[in-house]
Image (cartoon, rainbow, N blue to C red):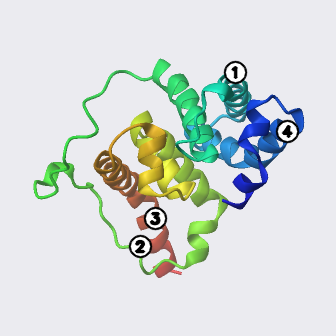
Amino acid sequence: MDKEQDISLNDLKSGDREAFAAMVNAYSPQLYRLALRMLGNPQEAEDVLQETFINAFRHLKQFEGRSQLSTWLYRIAANQALMRLRKNEPEMVSVDEPVQIDNGESMPRQLKDWCCLPESEFMTSEAQAQLDQAIHELSSALRAAFVLRDLQGLSTRETAEILEISESAVKTRLLRARLELRDKLSAYFGDRLEAIEHE
């Protein structure tokens, strides 16, 4: 990343305030978006952002640079957000078991074809609200994988590194998340398609 080259790890580790301020300015927007998507609450997202940089500041001397600075910061932010989510979430079955698609139980209940919907239908504030609601109904593990990979645009490898799981576990969680989201959103977009067809 270009911004990584502008921030000297040596300056950060030596306590250079300008380097730390540059890091905060460079990464705050993406880390805030990550926290907001995971938590759905602007105040909590702000808290996670602040906790992320406090933790980064405290542990900079231990950061060895084996991963990119951005990956390390994402890991801290994702962990902070996951800790908050898990406080309010009952223990669930493992989300890393292989998905059995050939038995009907794992498939979405209401699959509708959205191919005929105009793109503008997906961009409305109502559709975005439906998507946000569906994302927040995912388990914390599925939500983290989906937000990092599909919304933040990180690679499978980066997502695995941030969540400290295998790449195959990321792929399994992504598939589960996408199936659940499609299931949750099918009714809404199916109704929108019917409304358009009857106009």
Q: Are marks 2 and 1 in contact (CB under 8 Å)?
A: no
Between discs 3 and 2, the one toward the N terminus: 2
Measure the alpha-carbon separation of dots 4 and 3.
44 Å
Looking at the rendered structure, the kind of residue marked 3 is: Phe
Q: Which residue is mark 4?
A: 21
Q: Give x and y (percent) for residue 197.
A: 46, 81
Image vertical order of residue 62 relative to residue 149, above or below:
above
Measure the alpha-carbon separation of dots 3 and 2.
7 Å
Between discs 2 and 1, the one toward the N terminus: 1
Residue 192 is at least partly visible in this image = yes
Residue 139 is at least partly visible in this image = no
Q: Which residue is mark 3?
A: 189
Between discs 4 and 3, the one toward the N terminus: 4
Residue at the outermost left position: 103
Measure the alpha-carbon separation of dots 4 and 2.
45 Å
> On the picture, is 112 further left or further right than 134?
left
Looking at the rendered structure, the kind of residue marked 4 is: Ala
Name the residue rendered at 20%, 50% in the picture. 99
Name the residue rendered at 25%, 54% in the picture. 109
Please rate how many residues cluster around mark 1, counting C-alpha atoms within 10 Å: few if below 14, some from 14 to 19, many from 20.
few
Between discs 1 and 3, the one toward the N terminus: 1
Q: Nearer the viewer, mark 4 or mark 2?
A: 4
Please rate how many residues cluster around mark 4, counting C-alpha atoms within 10 Å: few if below 14, some from 14 to 19, many from 20.
few
Q: Which residue is mark 1?
A: 58
Looking at the rendered structure, the kind of residue marked 2 is: Trp
Q: Which residue is mark 2?
A: 114
Measure the alpha-carbon separation of dots 2 and 1.
48 Å
Looking at the rendered structure, the kind of residue marked 1 is: Arg
Measure the alpha-carbon separation of dots 1 and 3.
46 Å
The answer to which image quadrant residue 76 occupies is top right
Asked whether 65 or 111 is in front, the reply is: 65
Q: Nearer the viewer, mark 4 or mark 3?
A: 4
